[in-house]
Image (spheres, grey):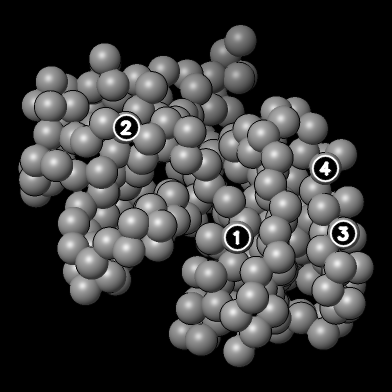
Amino acid sequence: MSKILALDTSTDACSAALLLDGQLLKRFKVEPRRHTHLLLPMVDELLQESGVTLASLDAIAFGRGPGSFAGIRIATGAAQGLALAADVPVLPISTLESLAYEFVQEQSLQQGQLLTALDARMDEVYWCAWEVSEGKLARMTPERVAAPGDVQVEALKPGFAALGSGWRYAENMSEALVAAAQTPLLELYPNAATMALLAEQALARGEAVAPDDVQPVYLRDQVAWKKKDQQ
């Protein structure tokens, strides 16, 4: 069993969680633009409540994106700093996978398909399609950023689950895609508690990396910087 601290600030939600030998302690708040004020106090609360020290952790996980550029940088920097101080490895976790895995766990889903989407601003969404087989999650597509009308997955069957804030752009998506989807769960956020569970699996697979080697995933960093330069 593992001891893993997880952090996420990739969306309007800020969260931290501590996985201790199968038990989860967690903090979660939806407070946009307050992540820098909320995150480390959440971590302190969890460590004090559990009596665990950073140095005794097996790893520190964080939401590596895609999501808010500023938010991803906050969690990345915090995870790197804490991991360096504690001399423990880091586990970057996909925000889109976190959404999918949370739904699978909550619904005890054994078979099905999902499409997770996050609001990417600039009239775009971050998205990925998933297949669930015997309770296990697998990607059907790469993680992508696109205009809502360009979200297309031919292999999706009617009744697939639609998850995340990106589905608020459903009116701009293809009629066929929206018609095939279940009622979207718009208020489902990536969260650190789910990421801690995914991180435990990643740690067992040997996917931990050194803090200095951490790379956030923006998906469209070149596009965003180009647009910023043009302003």
Res 144 seen here:
no
Mark 2 and mark 1 in contact (Cβ < 8 Å)? no
In the rendered structure, the answer to whether residue 200 lies left or right of residue 132 reads: right
> Marks 4 and 2: which is nearer the front?
2
Q: Amino acid at mark 1?
A: Ala
Report the residue that reaches farthest toward the bottom: 1
Point 29% across, 71% down: residue: 136
CA separation, marks 4 and 2? 29 Å
CA separation, marks 2 and 3? 34 Å
> Marks 4 and 3: which is nearer the front?
3
Mark 1 and mark 4 in contact (Cβ < 8 Å)? no
Mark 3 and mark 4 in contact (Cβ < 8 Å)? no
CA separation, marks 3 and 1? 15 Å
| Residue 139 found in image quarter | bottom left
Secondary structure under the numbered disc 3 in the rendered image:
helix
Q: Indicate which disc, 2 or 3, sits on the residue closer to the N terminus.
A: 3
Secondary structure under the numbered disc 4 in the rendered image:
helix
User: Any mark on residue 223, and which?
Assistant: none
Q: Residues within 10 Å of mark 1 (few under 14, many from 20)?
A: many
CA separation, marks 1 and 2? 22 Å
Point 26% across, 55% down: residue: 130
Residue indicated by mark 4 = 38
User: Any mark on residue 45, and which?
Assistant: 3
Q: Amino acid at mark 4?
A: Leu
Q: Indicate which disc, 3 or 1, sits on the residue closer to the N terminus.
A: 3
Residue 63 vertical position relative to residue 48 in the rendered view, above or below: above
